[in-house]
Image (tube, rainbow, N blue to C red):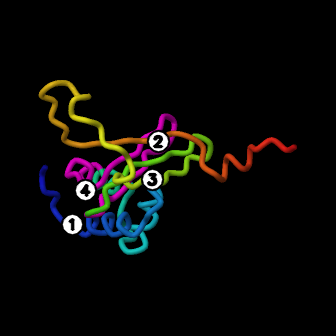
Amino acid sequence: MTMVRQTRQRQAVIEVLRASREHPDAAWIHGQVRGTLPSVSLGTVYRTLDALVRDGVVVTIERAGQATRYDYKHAGEDHHHAVCRSCGAIFDVDAGAVPSIPAAALPAGFQVTEVRLEFMGVCPGCAADHTPEG
């Protein structure tokens, strides 16, 4: 892991991500950062996010045809994600609630460096919207 140099822009992006539980995209992050750094460009926000992902501070949530979403890795809050296929909402799922995979299920000698698990489905709000009327 490389250490990301702390610039005002990077610190502002980190602060926005720390404060958000919404898994925002770069455009939303850019709008928030502009509140404190009005001259920051969208390109700078993208480069900053890329560096933070490389450093392991931020993870991406990617869906085909949609903007990449970002999630700050809060210390001590290991979690996975549940994604609604209907509205695109992303929910955190406590990693402790997910059964672990036995090492025997992995190829011999495989060294796990990261676990990313996503649950795909329909959120309660979308499911209620599509319930057949009786």
Instruction: Read off the residue under disc 2.
Output: 119
Q: Amino acid at mark 4?
A: Val
| Total numbered labels | 4
**In this view of the protein, which residue sits in the foreground, 109 or 54?**
109
C-alpha separation, residue under disc 3 versus residue under disc 1: 21 Å
Front: mark 3 or 2: 2
C-alpha separation, residue under disc 2 versus residue under disc 4: 22 Å
Instruction: Read off the residue under disc 1.
Output: 7
Residue found farthest to the bottom? 36
Give neighbour class at mark 4: few <14, some 14-19, many 20+ (Cα, 10 Å).
Answer: some
C-alpha separation, residue under disc 1 versus residue under disc 2: 35 Å
**In this view of the protein, which residue sits in the foreground, 122 or 87?**
122
Of marks 2 and 4, which one's residue comes earlier in the chain? 4
In the displayed structure image, the side of residue 116 where residue 28 appears, left or right: right
Instruction: Read off the residue under disc 3.
Output: 25
Q: Amino acid at mark 1?
A: Thr
**In this view of the protein, which residue sits in the foreground, 118 or 62?**
118
Q: Which numbered tag is attached to residue 57?
A: 4
In the rendered view of the protein, which quadrant contains the C terminus?
top right
C-alpha separation, residue under disc 4 versus residue under disc 1: 15 Å
Residue 88 position, x and y percent, is: 56, 46
Q: Amino acid at mark 3?
A: Asp
On whether residue 45 falls in the magenta region, the answer is no
Question: Residue at position x 35%, y 44% from top?
Answer: 99
On whether residue 72 falls in the magenta region, the answer is yes
Front: mark 4 or 3: 4
Circles 1 and 2 in contact, beta carbons < 8 Å: no
Label 1 sits on a secondary structure element that is: loop
Q: Which numbered tag is attached to residue 117?
A: none
